[in-house]
Image (tube, helix red, strand yellow):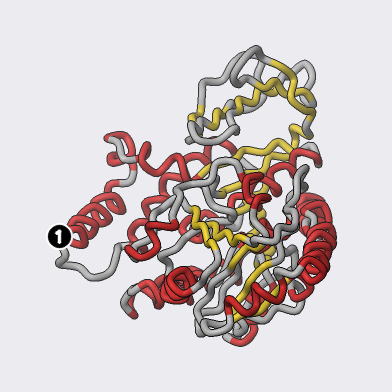
Amino acid sequence: MFHALEHNSELTSTVFRNISSNTAHTYTYYTFSSNPSINLHIGPGPAKILFTMNSNISILLVATLDKSANADRAKSVFSMLQREKYNVVFFNTQEHFAHMLNVRFFLTSAKHFVSYLVKLAVYKIKLRRTYPIIEEMYVRGSFLHRYIQKAHPQLIICQNPQYIICLLNKKIKTIYDAPSLFSELLQYNGFDNKTIRAFTKIEDRVLLDSSAVTFQWPIFHFQAKLLNKKITNEFSATYGCSKRRVFAAYSSKPKVVYLGNMNAPWINPNLLNTIVESTKYQVDLYGYEPPEKSALLENFHGYLRNLDAITKYQFGIITADRDIPNFSAKYLLYISYGLPVLCPEWRKDAILKPATIYYNERNFDQVIGQFGKKGNWERKHLAALKLSRQLSWEKTLQPFRKKVRSLIDTL
């Protein structure tokens, strides 16, 4: 949650603090008029100079720091912008929404607020089938607009589809770092056609009007092309891998790990349930939400706070629906630790193929038996490590860095 603080006579810009109880990201930026390239970091412990920045260029990054693997991209883009010495404000969407429901916001955004609360109440008492996502988007957009007016950024980067209204600002350079074509996913979450059409209209306008657009994995570029989406200044900057200090090791008794959401339709909960119930191998499940299928609860161990713990496993597993195009960020998390990835045979990806082991509902144990042999496992392990180096954030975000520079150069 960002709080805009009062101006100080020595400050040349508004101060922001990102308060986040469940992350390590707590910042206050003070830009001193006597030396505009120096910023003071106030966080836990004594104040210290964190890094120098180009105080003439302010960038607002709208992204989510949650407990999923998807947060890696937000952190990596933020770090990349830091290294470029930009003045970056991180608007953590995970933190702020609950704080905005107050009297002051009601008075400044009554129209959207009332509409949202009424439709939310109707949804809660089961009189409305579809969650009021459009009304919520406008509420979120109105709230974020207040911060944009205070921060005066030269560039807005948005990674959260529910905040893309902030990109419809022709006075500011904008980048939509799209995790997916979100309008296509809505149809699998039970939203009605009216809601899907309304969201698609907003999404299409953002794709067309943003200064630049990238999708976080090639499958969504292809999907947009198949749907004849009109996109302005599209570029490719794929998801990447973080550097690790510890890695998986071979075991004659292989174990399988699953990280992440176990309930979304695109991850195919039925397939995950079938695998866990039928396999003779140990499959441990970790996530920030418990599985809805009761058969999975015995294997569920809650949220894995220390990701290094997955090095005690020999395989990571992906599940996927046959008909829903999607990408699993946890795939790259697995290979960053050297884990070969078990993936449904209907989810083929040329980039990820070297570290992938394909399976189906019937041959899961047979596949693990084959690749659980030391020589076969080590080949896939080395392939995973090699692929993770090829897909390091430093490399995959190079096009992103260049795009930011090119947009800044036009100011």
Q: Is residue 400 above or below residue 342?
A: above
Residue 322 left/right relative to 106 = right
Q: At 66% from the left edge and 79% from the top edge, which residue is drawn?
A: 358
Which residue is located at x 46 percent, y 58 percent? 162
Q: Report the amino acid beneath label 1.
A: Ile
Q: Which residue is mark 1?
A: 125
Foreground residue among 198 and 310: 310
In this rendered view, identify the residue nearer to me: 398 or 403.
398
Q: Is residue 128 above or below residue 259?
A: below
Q: Residue at x 69, y 63 (%)?
A: 212
Q: Is residue 392 left or right of residue 134?
A: right
In depth, the one of 348 and 54 nearer the eye is 348
Residue 399, percent across and down? 80, 60
Residue at position x 61%, y 87% in the image: 226
Residue 411 visible, this orientation: no
Q: Is residue 161 left or right of residue 245?
A: left
Which image quadrant for residue 246? top right
Where is residue 125 shown, x and y percent of the image? 14, 60
Residue 325: % across, % down: 56, 78
Q: Is residue 366 above or below residue 125?
A: below
Quarter of the figure with residue 269 = bottom left
Does residue 3 sit above or below 82 in this rendering?
A: above
Is residue 198 toward the left or the right of residue 155 in the image?
left
Q: Secondary structure at mark 1?
A: loop
The mark tally for this picture is: 1
